[in-house]
């Protein structure tokens, strides 16, 4: 299973935050089956400039935009039309580097259209995720 998600990280504090790793978990699945952060890409639907996932800083009072690739192998899961609740977590350093911990960043609803589910059921590329937009696009 592969997911490409455009994400924006915002640090509202004055001190930079170093994100060591990311992972996604489906809320209705066992928590020991996360999708790992494997790469970043420059544009959706393009493997040009694909870079392996590395730690990255989010500077104080700044936002950072990334398109992140998450994978899980083997992938017995196939997307079907519908909604999936997903949790994004970040691994951060504690006061000492050996004290890394996972922090919940956001839980969100991922909407999969019928067209997306039939074209590539093991891969999801996020576009506009608003349910109203999906319904409007399907009706035209």
Image (spheres, grey):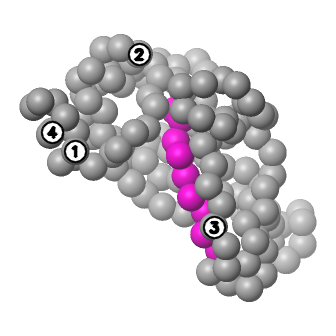
Q: Would you say residue 107 sits in the magenta stretch?
A: no
**Could you tell whether 40 is left or right of 54 in the image?**
left
SS at circle 1: helix
Q: Is residue 20 above or below residue 83?
A: below
Q: Nearer the viewer, residue 86 or 17?
A: 17
Residue under the point 32% across and 21% down = 117
In the rendered image, residue 60, in percent from the top left (x then y), is placed at: 73, 78
| Residues tagged 2 and 3 counted as in contact (Cβ below 8 A) | no
SS at circle 4: helix
For marks 1 and 2 on the same chain, the one whose residue lies earlier in the sequence? 2
In the picture of the structure, the residue carrying the numbered disc 2 is: 120
Q: CA distance from mark 3 to mark 4?
A: 30 Å
> Any mark on residue 19, and which?
none
Q: CA distance from mark 1 to mark 3?
A: 26 Å
For marks 4 and 2 on the same chain, the one whose residue lies earlier in the sequence? 2
In the picture of the structure, the residue carrying the numbered disc 1 is: 133
For marks 2 and 3 on the same chain, the one whose residue lies earlier in the sequence? 3
| Residues tagged 1 and 2 counted as in contact (Cβ below 8 A) | no
In the picture of the structure, the residue carrying the numbered disc 4 is: 135
Q: CA distance from mark 2 to mark 3?
A: 31 Å
Q: Is residue 85 above or below residue 124?
A: below
Residue under the point 67% across and 79% down = 61
Q: Which residues are magenta?
A: 3-11
Q: Is residue 128 visible?
A: yes
| Residues tagged 4 and 1 counted as in contact (Cβ below 8 A) | yes
Are there few (<14), some (14-19), or many (20+) residues within 10 Å of tag 4? few
In the picture of the structure, the residue carrying the numbered disc 3 is: 63
């Amino acid at each position: 299973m592969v997911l490409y998600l455009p994400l924006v990280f915002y640090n509202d504090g004055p001190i930079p935050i170093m994100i060591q790793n990311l992972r996604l978990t489906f809320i209705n699945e066992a928590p020991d089956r996360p999708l790992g952060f494997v790469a970043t890409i420059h544009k959706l639907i393009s493997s040009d400039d694909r870079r392996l996932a590395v730690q990255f800083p989010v500077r104080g009072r700044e936002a950072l935009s990334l398109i992140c690739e998450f994978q899980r192998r083997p992938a017995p899961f196939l997307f079907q039309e519908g909604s999936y609740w997903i949790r994004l977590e970040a691994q951060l350093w504690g006061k000492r580097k050996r004290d890394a911990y996972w922090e919940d960043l956001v839980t969100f609803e991922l909407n999969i259209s019928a067209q997306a589910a039939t074209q590539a059921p093991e891969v999801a590329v996020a576009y506009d995720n608003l349910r109203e937009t999906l319904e409007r696009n399907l009706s035209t």
